[in-house]
Image (cartoon, rainbow, N blue to C red):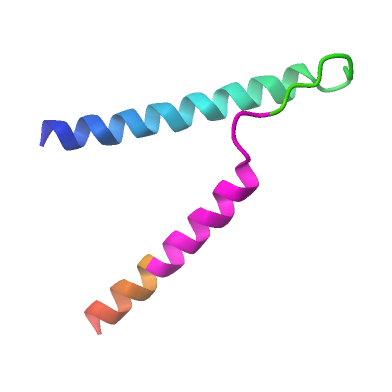
Amino acid sequence: MRVLIGIILGALLTIGGAYLYDSHIALSTTGTSASVQRPMVNWDVVSTKWNHLTDRARAEWTRLAG
């Protein structure tokens, strides 16, 4: 049980850290075109894949429960 909690906590910390880093980069580079830094994560792709995952999970749950 501790291992599972550790894995989940590690994943959440990694995602949260990447989000905070990208948020900081976006805030610090607005208005300055001299040093353009790309974000670490393409959040549009993450959003699309998350939506596909949740849709598939809902469909599988409906199939199993029905």
Identify the residue at the far bottom of this view.
66
Q: Is residue 66 above or below residue 50?
A: below
Query: Which residue is found at the position 15% from the left and 32% from the top?
Result: 3
In the rendered image, which quarter is residue 27 located in? Answer: top right
Type of secondary structure dominating the magenta stretch: helix
Report how many numbered discs are placed on residues in the image.
0
Q: Is residue 66 above or below residue 29?
A: below
Query: Which residue is found at the position 49% from the left and 24% from the top?
Result: 17
Residue 34, position as x, y percentages in the image: 88, 14
Q: Does 61 sit left or right of 30 as displayed?
A: left
Quadrant location of the C terminus in the rendered image = bottom left
Q: Does 43 sit left or right of 29 as displayed?
A: left
Query: Which residue is found at the position 79% from the left and 19% from the top?
Result: 29
Residue 35, position as x, y percentages in the image: 82, 15
Question: For residue 66: magenta?
Answer: no
Query: Which residue is found at the position 28% from the left and 36% from the top?
Result: 8
Quadrant location of the N terminus in the rendered image = top left
Q: Is residue 52 above or below residue 41?
A: below
Residue 60, position as x, y percentages in the image: 32, 73
Q: Does 59 sit left or right of 3 as displayed?
A: right
The range drawn in magenta is: 39-56
Identify the residue at the far left of this view.
1
Q: Nearer the viewer, residue 54 or 40?
A: 40
Question: For residue 50: magenta?
Answer: yes
Residue 59, position as x, y percentages in the image: 38, 75
